[in-house]
Image (cartoon, coloured by chain):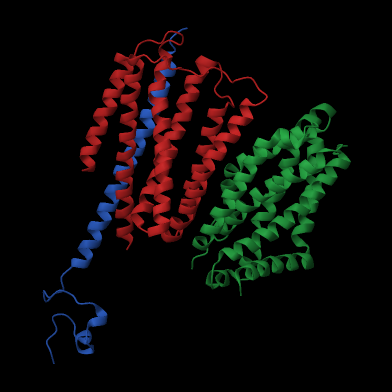
Amino acid sequence: MPDHWSFVAAAYGLTAAVLLIYWRRLATKEREVEASKRLNAERSREPSITGHPRSEPASRTPLQQNQRPGAPLP
Amino acid sequence: MSYARRALAVAWKDLAVERRSKETLNALVFFSLLLLFVFQFTLGGDRERLAAVLPGVLWLGFVLSALLALGRTFLVEREHDCWEGLLLAPGDKSAIYLGKLAGNLALMLVVEALVLGLFVVFFDIDLGRALPGLLVVVLLGTLGLAAVGTLFAAMTANVRARELLFPVLLLPVQIPVLLATVKATEALLLGEPLGAVGHWVKLLLAADVIYVVVSLLTFDVVLEA
Amino acid sequence: MVKTLGWLTAAALAAGLVMAFGVAPREVTQGNVQRIMYVHVPLILASYVAFVVLAVASLVYLVRRDPAADGVAHASGEVGVMFVGLGIATGSIWGKPTWGTWWTWDARLTSVAILFVMYLGYLLLRGTIDDPERAARYCAVLGIVAALDIPLVHFSVYWWRTLHQPPSLMKPGGFTGSSSILWPLLVNLLAFILLYVYFVARRARLLRAQAEAIA
């Protein structure tokens, strides 16, 4: 029987192609998630102008909430 | 309310709704008649060829009707905003499954009896001695279809592309039931006794047990709030 | 650690390739086209591993509601479908020159095709449900139903093909038992199982990261 190397190439080639595409998709998605995580982290870590870390809005007292960062106390 | 009474209540409600509106039943009867025509036009020319494919065509008709009937299992709850009610129902929700299953089974058996009758008339089949065995096979096969169908109907009730997803999920899983019923029906119509297809009957029994037990155990999970 | 696994997998795959073409002999009846077996069989067997893991992970999820178990099930489903799809394709490519046909409905091919379609449905269900908790629950149920269906599929298809019918065509690559065929096969099998584990580990990790990013 002849060797049919083209079929062998097709089988191995198809397998390699699909597996590589899947592998690259994983890598791309990982990078996307990394990027969006870094973005989220930066946003939440943005310091206020006074340099104090921002407190949660709900935990601030009315006096604190009304006070703009950097504005002098009355 | 006891478990059995709750199940019966669900079944009774569905059947009562159906008996009053006859919406599903009428549509399914009409659909079966249409199927008959389609089969005749596509396959009917050659008498012998038709006789050869008849068991498959019969069960094809059953399955297509089943897809329509089962797909509508939770239609009433969905359309009338009762879905939340189902989710919040107290107690073991598998009672709802049993009730729905009983209702579906009844509906499907009625439609199948009609389809079989139509086939006998239009395709001139002699059921004769095959009938008791045929009844067993039809009952077991229908239970298999309804058991998984009811579970999957609940799962796909509130997802996108429900009408597509339901048959796509159900059909591959039902292939063993389809193979068993068609092969058994074929043998029975050729005059063989029920004993000759004992292995298929056992497979159907095993399938039915597996499907019903798994559905009972997991229905609560599907209907979690 | 996933990285090390990745390198190990790559090494195993390379070794497998070398053995498939360097060590394995030219088959007596079929010629070199038989070398397709060294990807085809490992792909199919590795997909079986994937589906078993999917079933177990589904069960674990239903009992413990651990998202990690759902992640493993999800990833296993993806890799399993990919492997079995490739297995069917490579088998078909192998079958054309040896059997003269791209496809035949013999017992094994039919069973594997049903498997492919069942688990493709699993992935479709995943894709259709947006709520991750509901998707996890529903897919776990489907995973268990599918797994329990497998013995039914096996027997029904086997009886369908063999009863009242002569045995089906000779399958390519019957085992002569010679070690020069066995060892390349085993090495490739190990390589593809490693590849499965690597892909699942990475995919599950990605799923976790994606879930955290949304939270």
- Residue C2 location in percent, x, y? 24, 42
Front residue of B87 and A56:
B87
Chain in blue colour: A
**Residue at (55%, 35%) from the top-left corner?**
C154
**Residue at (36%, 34%) from the top-left corner?**
A19
**Residue at (73%, 68%) from the top-left corner?**
B17
Asked whether residue C147 is in view, the answer is: yes
**Residue at (34%, 52%) from the top-left corner?**
C207
The quarter of the rendered structure image containing the N terminus of chain B is bottom right
Q: Is residue C74 left or right of residue B125?
A: left
Asked whether residue B46 is in view, the answer is: no
Q: Residue furthest bottom?
A: A74
Q: Residue furthest front?
A: B195
Quadrant of residue A15 in the image?
top left
Compared with B130, B152 (above or below) is below
Quadrant of residue B58 in the image?
top right
Compared with B147, B50 (above or below) is above
Write down the colour of chain C. red
- Residue C25 location in percent, x, y? 35, 11
Chain in green colour: B
- Residue B170 location in percent, x, y? 59, 47
